[in-house]
Image (cartoon, rainbow, N blue to C red):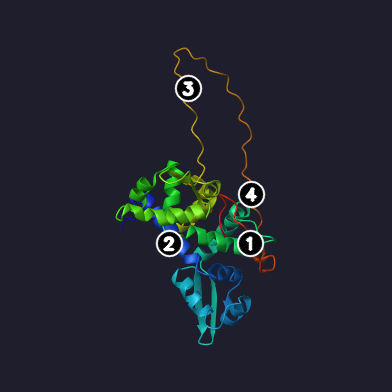
Amino acid sequence: MAITALPPDTDADIARVTEALAMITPRWNVRILLALSGPPLRYSELAAKVSWLQNGQLHPKLKSLCDAGLVERTEHTARHVSYRHTERGAALLPVLPVIVTWAEEHLEKADGPLPAIEQIEDSLTLLTRRHAAAILWVLKSRQEVSGRALARIVMPSSDWTNIYPPLRQLVADGLVDTDGIGQPYRLSAAGDGLGPVLGALSAWSAGQSLDQAAQHPVWGHPQAKPAPRPWLSSQPRPTPAALPPARTTASSPAWHHRDLFSHATTARPKAAIPAGGPRR
């Protein structure tokens, strides 16, 4: 069933990204997935790695991750059960450094070093706002849109004024900008910078290689088409020049999953939120 008034392929893409965010954003889910990096773990071994979870919290979390297809439970004997990533769960891990890269540039700066895992959790919280994926998609593709027009696209079966609570939240989060009441909405620099994150989530949720993220029609960076030249009947043909050496894209940093837990978590006061900057 269509969620938005966008074409079916686009609507399905937004729905998949929204579902993917709903799988991984709940508290502790990302930390459990990171703790499972490596060989399979017995329940007691995993519990020791996530010792901050209280008794009774880990089991329902593991069940939800198994139901989502991210973790696999193997029962060797009645007394020996192990847990490990599924292929789909393992494929999600390379998305996490992409989120960290965005967070380091756009999230509100803390007084001290913030562990990467907290940056991931804070970023995911912003992206799981209601209708956030659809609103960000439309603003990225259309640049500036009025609230009424945005409502007709994002929530066609609802009263159009219902678009304003999620819009106000995204403005407060620093992902969307507007010049005031009655003025169109557009992505902020932070919202526009989400391209690699949402492109990676789109590729992962569609079961594609993350290399496909750059080819996403909205969040990717497809090669621009050259501007057409004026037609001349006697236009001379230039001598073909040697092609320049192919440019190689910068390789992603060599992230280790242990890096995402770096820096001890310390209590810190809430810093003033800079204008236009995302909240934590």
Helix, strand or loop under label 2: helix
Is the Cβ of the residue at disc 1 closer than 8 Å to that at disc 4?
no
Q: Earlier in the sequence, mark 4 or mark 3?
A: 3
**Label 1: few (<14), some (14–19) or many (≥20) C-alpha neighbours in 10 Å:** many
**Label 2: few (<14), some (14–19) or many (≥20) C-alpha neighbours in 10 Å:** some
Residue 98 is drawn in which quadrant?
bottom right
Q: Which residue type does callout 4 highlight?
A: Ser
Q: Earlier in the sequence, mark 3 or mark 1?
A: 1
Q: Earlier in the sequence, mark 1 or mark 2?
A: 2
Residue placed at 44% from the left, 18% from the top?
Answer: 231
Q: Which residue type does callout 1 highlight?
A: Ala
Q: Earlier in the sequence, mark 4 or mark 2?
A: 2
Distance from Cα at disc 4 to Cα at disc 2: 29 Å
Q: Is residue 162 visible?
A: yes
Residue that numbered label 1 is attached to = 116
- Residue 229: which disc? 3
Residue placed at 51% from the left, 79% from the top?
Answer: 59
Distance from Cα at disc 3 to Cα at disc 2: 45 Å
Where residue 196 sits in the image (x, y, percent)?
54, 50
Q: Farthest top residue? A: 234
Residue that numbered label 4 is attached to = 251
- Residue 19: which disc? 2
| Residue closer to the observer: 52 or 107 | 107
Q: Which residue type does callout 3 highlight?
A: Arg
Helix, strand or loop under label 4: loop
Is the Cβ of the residue at disc 3 closer than 8 Å to that at disc 1?
no
Q: From the viewer's perspective, is residue 20 above or below residue 274?
A: below
Q: Which residue type does callout 2 highlight?
A: Glu
Residue placed at 35% from the left, 49% from the top?
Answer: 153
Where residue 215 sits in the image (x, y, percent)?
49, 45
